[in-house]
Amino acid sequence: MDVDLTETRWRKSSYSGGGGACIEVADGFAGVMPVRDSKDPEGPALFFAASSWQSFVGAVRAGEFGAV
């Protein structure tokens, strides 16, 4: 996927813990959710299907993943 992210507004995930272990997401992309490592803002972004990202977030909210 070739998408220009230079003007993208990123936000930290509300489920990212403190201590620099954060991910950032960008809203406003039809059908996909860009995700990047907050420690490497110039690095690559991963793109997830919006429905897959919603399923992942739902599983986190439901506590389906153990503490890391």
Image (spheres, rainbow, N blue to C red):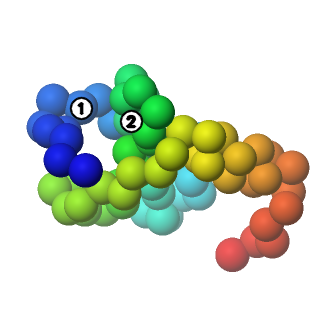
Which residue: 59% across, 57% down?
17
- Counting from the top left corner in percent of width and height, residue 10 is at 34, 36
Q: Disc 2 designates what residue? A: 26
Q: Who comes first in sequence, dot 2 or dot 1?
A: 1
Question: Observer-nearest residue: 12 or 46?
Answer: 46
Q: Quadrant of residue 40?
A: bottom left
Residue extending farthest to the bottom is 68
Q: Residues within 10 Å of mark 1 (few under 14, many from 20)?
A: few
Residue 25 placement, left or right of 44: right
Which residue: 86% across, 49% down?
62
Which residue: 25% across, 50% down?
1
Kind of residue sitting beneath label 2: Ala
In the rendered picture of this protein, how many numbered marks are placed on residues? Answer: 2
Q: Residues within 10 Å of mark 2 (few under 14, many from 20)?
A: some
Q: Is residue 37 above or below residue 30?
A: below
Q: State whether residue 20 appears in this view.
A: yes
For the residue labelled by badge 1, is the local secondary structure a helix, a strand or a loop? loop
Residues at circles 2 and 1 in contact by the CB criterion of under 8 Å = yes
- Counting from the top left corner in percent of width and height, residue 2 is at 18, 47
Cα separation between marks 2 and 1? 7 Å
Kind of residue sitting beneath label 1: Thr
Q: State whether residue 15 appears in this view.
A: no
- Counting from the top left corner in percent of width and height, residue 23 is at 45, 54
Q: Quadrant of the C terminus?
A: bottom right
Residue 37 placement, left or right of 23: left
Which residue: 79% across, 66% down?
65
For the residue labelled by badge 2, is the local secondary structure a helix, a strand or a loop? strand
Q: Is residue 21 above or below residue 15?
A: below
Q: Disc 1 designates what residue? A: 8
